[in-house]
Image (cartoon, rainbow, N blue to C red):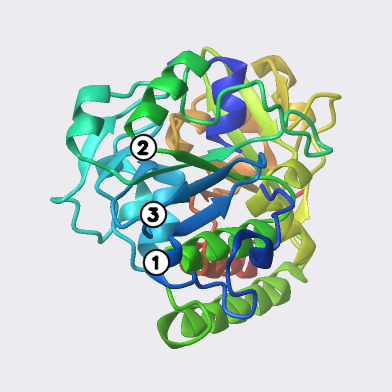
């Protein structure tokens, strides 16, 4: 499947400087909203403030953000994404029977089905245009194919965008702020336990990364070639690198990716390869490529899935635990 560079950048890719909760009429100490009589207000990472008479209870939007809100107890009424929610690993174990699937590929949104789901609020993400984290307010938010489509969706319900830039650690906290505004108790109970498990998984990953094995995240297809991610530009990878994971610098001057033809693949060795689960080749398909078969990680069978998960304590803790296990077992082969 051929993908444009925009879809590659967004689909495999964090945190905008938020207006203080107190400035939005919220309780800065708890992140909760004031009484219902005061309505609901949230300022997103592009500086857009959404004000409603009541706290939204019917939330729809992009899978990537919805999965995190759901992990905090907010089940969506409708979703869309690069894949169907049924095929998205971020929703494994969830009862999807009450969710209207209104889009299963980038920019594909059934507006009639979305309107029928009657959402109070639409949530999505917004990606920077460069490694400095610059946001383009003139560009559509992620998941929309155009400003015109975004405006049509905004007629159904107001939209807020969470920026996915910097470290996942920061994006997670921003997402927690959004969840708190929607009524989630983020300071105690289950969320406090989630936070503890996230911190434990972070420590486990740091310990496993102490071996120093090198890691290269890739997106690979026969048509598009070998795309290597730059860890500092992806929130999740940025977090893992901060925790000690030794990611290979793929070089190149572009944002997020360095892409090369198959003939150049052997010039980028690593001990471990993380292959994208979205549209990318499987380990068997990668190994069948003559040049990729020469890579030390491929020769040693040290390929593991790169899961595109939400910015929340639950999802990140689960993946960091998996990654720690792989790194602990990996051998240096470069």
Q: Is residue 120 visible?
A: yes
Q: Write down the residue under mark 1.
A: 37
Query: Height in image: 298 above or below 150?
Result: below
Q: Position of residue 159 (x, y in %)?
A: 46, 38
Q: CA distance from mark 3 to mark 1?
A: 8 Å
Identity of the residue drawn at 46% across and 64% down: 38
Query: Height in image: 300 above or below 249?
Result: below
Q: First in sequence: mark 1 or mark 2?
A: 1
Q: Position of residue 272 (x, y in %)?
A: 65, 50
Q: Residue furthest left?
A: 97
Packing grade of label 1 (10 A; few <14, some 14-19, many >=20) is few
Q: Position of residue 267 (x, y in %)?
A: 79, 28
Q: Which marked residue is nearer to the observer: mark 1 or mark 2?
A: 1
Residue 323 located left or right of residue 206: left
Query: Height in image: 219 above or below 31?
Result: above
Q: Write down the residue under mark 3.
A: 53
* Rendered image: mark on residue 157: 2
Identity of the residue drawn at 64% across and 65% down: 21
- Give the quarter of the image for residue 311: bottom right
The kind of secondary structure element at disc 3 is loop
Q: Residue furthest front?
A: 37
Q: Is residue 146 visible?
A: no
Q: CA distance from mark 1 to mark 2?
A: 20 Å
Residue 141 located left or right of residue 231: left
Identity of the residue drawn at 32% across and 31% down: 156
The kind of secondary structure element at disc 2 is loop
- Give the quarter of the image for residue 19: bottom right
Identity of the residue drawn at 51% across and 73% down: 32
Q: Which marked residue is nearer to the observer: mark 3 or mark 2?
A: 3
- Give the quarter of the image for residue 320: bottom right
Is 334 or 146 nearer to us in this picture? Answer: 146
């Amino acid at each position: 499947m051929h993908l444009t560079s925009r879809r590659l950048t967004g689909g495999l890719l964090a945190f905008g400087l938020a207006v203080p909760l107190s400035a939005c009429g919220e309780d800065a100490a708890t992140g909760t909203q004031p009484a219902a009589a005061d309505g609901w207000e949230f300022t997103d990472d592009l500086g857009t403030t959404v004000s409603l008479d009541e706290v939204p209870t019917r939330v729809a939007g992009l899978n990537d953000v919805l999965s995190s809100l759901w992990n905090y107890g907010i089940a969506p009424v409708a979703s869309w994404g690069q894949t169907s929610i049924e095929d998205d690993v971020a929703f494994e174990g969830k009862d999807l029977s009450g969710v209207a699937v209104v889009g299963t590929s980038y920019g594909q949104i059934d507006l009639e089905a979305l309107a029928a789901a009657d959402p109070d609020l639409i949530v999505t993400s917004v990606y920077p245009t460069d490694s400095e984290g610059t946001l383009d307010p003139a560009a559509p938010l992620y998941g929309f194919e155009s400003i015109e489509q975004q405006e049509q969706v905004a007629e159904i319900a107001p939209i807020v965008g969470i920026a996915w830039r910097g470290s996942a650690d920061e994006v997670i906290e921003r997402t927690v702020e959004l969840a708190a505004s929607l009524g989630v108790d983020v300071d105690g109970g289950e969320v406090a336990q989630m936070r503890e498990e996230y911190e434990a998984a972070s420590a486990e990953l740091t310990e496993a990364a102490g071996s120093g094995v090198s890691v290269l995240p890739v997106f690979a297809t026969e048509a598009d070639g070998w795309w290597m991610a730059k860890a500092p530009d992806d929130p999740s990878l940025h977090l893992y690198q901060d925790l000690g994971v030794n990611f290979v610098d793929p070089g190149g001057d572009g944002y997020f990716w360095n892409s090369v033809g198959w003939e150049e693949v052997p010039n980028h060795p690593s001990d471990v390869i993380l292959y994208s689960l979205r549209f990318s080749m499987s380990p068997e398909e990668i190994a069948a490529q003559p040049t990729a078969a020469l890579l030390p990680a491929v020769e040693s069978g040290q390929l593991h899935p790169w899961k595109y998960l939400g910015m929340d304590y639950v999802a990140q803790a689960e993946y960091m635990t998996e990654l720690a296990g792989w790194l602990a077992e990996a051998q240096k082969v470069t």
